[in-house]
């Protein structure tokens, strides 16, 4: 559940594996209109969170009088970078800006006292660049080849590489198998550095082996 109370304690910075967003039973995917983004994890969002009970609650859709993101000249300057690193995979194919606007409205507005609309996107792109999750996995021999890996080995590979604790979220593929869907890293309240995650979401990778689908 969620609440619209103000304040937050830290951020989840969430990256998604498009191969797993696109191969579930209820999800069709389309490339953005500007073409196929480079293979790799993409940003899902930067989400303000509480580190206090009730766990699982988070602020969302906070009051804001900010302008639409695409009317913000500073944000426009980030568009090529956003297109590459924060693509939307929903159909019909789009320029992805609806996804960015949704993330700003739902999550970004709740940290606006700390990160302006421009900073919200700029900081997200910076952390995407400084945490190359796919490279961390490849270095550990964990490849997006449709094979199965243990959750422990996936988690350890990323944690060793970025030197902080993380959370792996699974979803379920068309054949009912758990697969690597998202990686949550944690960022301090001011949006300046990675931290160990103060609290983790409920486990979602319930089987011992999880699949890393190709894309
Ligand atoms: P799902 O249930 O698909 O994981 O999440 C649906 C949406 O709820 C996410 O895209 C995100 O907007 C929000 N959400 C899920 N878990 C969290 C969380 O732990 N913290 C925050 N701030 N938002 C979350
Ligand atoms: P959440 O509230 O779950 O953060 O936001 C997900 C919303 O963004 C959903 O309404 C979803 O349809 C939309 N969306 C658009 N493109 C994408 C994408 O590439 N990945 C995900 N997870 N959601 C997307």
Image (spheres, helix red, strand yellow):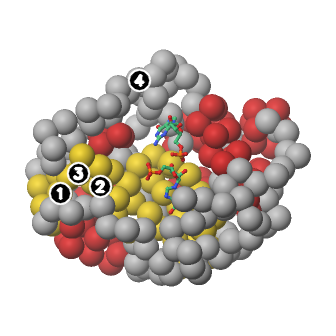
Q: Nearer the viewer, residue 40 or 167?
A: 167
Query: Gap between marks 1 and 4, in whole Å?
Result: 25 Å
Q: Residue under circle 3? A: 179
Q: Residue under circle 4? A: 30
Whether label 3 touches label 4, CB < 8 Å: no
Dot 1 falls on a residue whose secondary structure is strand
Q: Residue under circle 1? A: 210
Query: Gap between marks 3 and 4, in whole Å?
Result: 20 Å
Whether label 1 touches label 2, CB < 8 Å: yes
Nearer the camera: disc 2 or disc 4: 2
Label 3: how many residues lie within 10 Å, few (<14), some (14-19) or many (20+)? many
Tell me the residue at 19%/71% (across/down): 153
Residue 190: mark in rendering:
none
Q: Residue under circle 2? A: 170
Whether label 3 touches label 2, CB < 8 Å: yes
Dot 4 falls on a residue whose secondary structure is loop
Label 1: how many residues lie within 10 Å, few (<14), some (14-19) or many (20+)? many
Whether label 3 touches label 1, CB < 8 Å: yes
Label 2: how many residues lie within 10 Å, few (<14), some (14-19) or many (20+)? many
Q: Is mark 4 within 8 Å of ligand 2?
A: no
Going from the N terminus, do you reach mark 1 or mark 4 first? 4
Q: Nearer the viewer, residue 93 or 78?
A: 93
Disc tally is: 4
- Is residue 162 something one can see in this rendering? no
Q: Residue furthest right?
A: 65
Going from the N terminus, do you reach mark 2 or mark 4 first? 4
- x and y percentages locating residue 34 in the rendered image: 53, 22
């Amino acid at each position: 559940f969620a609440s619209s109370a103000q304040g937050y304690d830290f951020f989840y910075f969430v990256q998604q594996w498009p191969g797993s967003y696109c191969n579930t039973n209820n999800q069709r995917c389309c490339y953005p209109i500007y073409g196929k983004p480079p293979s790799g994890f993409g940003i899902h969002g930067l989400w303000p969170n509480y580190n206090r009970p009730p766990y699982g609650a988070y602020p969302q859709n906070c009051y804001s009088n900010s302008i639409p993101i695409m009317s913000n000249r500073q944000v426009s300057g980030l568009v090529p970078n956003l297109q590459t690193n924060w693509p939307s995979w929903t159909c019909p194919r789009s320029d992805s800006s609806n996804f960015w606007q949704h993330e700003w409205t739902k999550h970004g507005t709740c940290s606006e006292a700390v990160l302006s609309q421009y900073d919200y996107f700029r900081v997200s792109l910076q952390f995407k660049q400084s945490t190359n999750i796919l490279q961390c996995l490849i270095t550990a021999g964990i490849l997006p080849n449709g094979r199965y890996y243990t959750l422990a080995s996936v988690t350890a590979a990323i944690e060793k590489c970025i030197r902080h604790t993380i959370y792996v979220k699974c979803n379920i593929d068309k054949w009912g198998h758990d697969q690597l869907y998202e990686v949550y890293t944690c960022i301090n309240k001011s949006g300046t550095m990675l931290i160990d995650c103060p609290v983790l979401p409920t486990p979602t990778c319930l089987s011992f082996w999880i699949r890393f689908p190709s894309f």
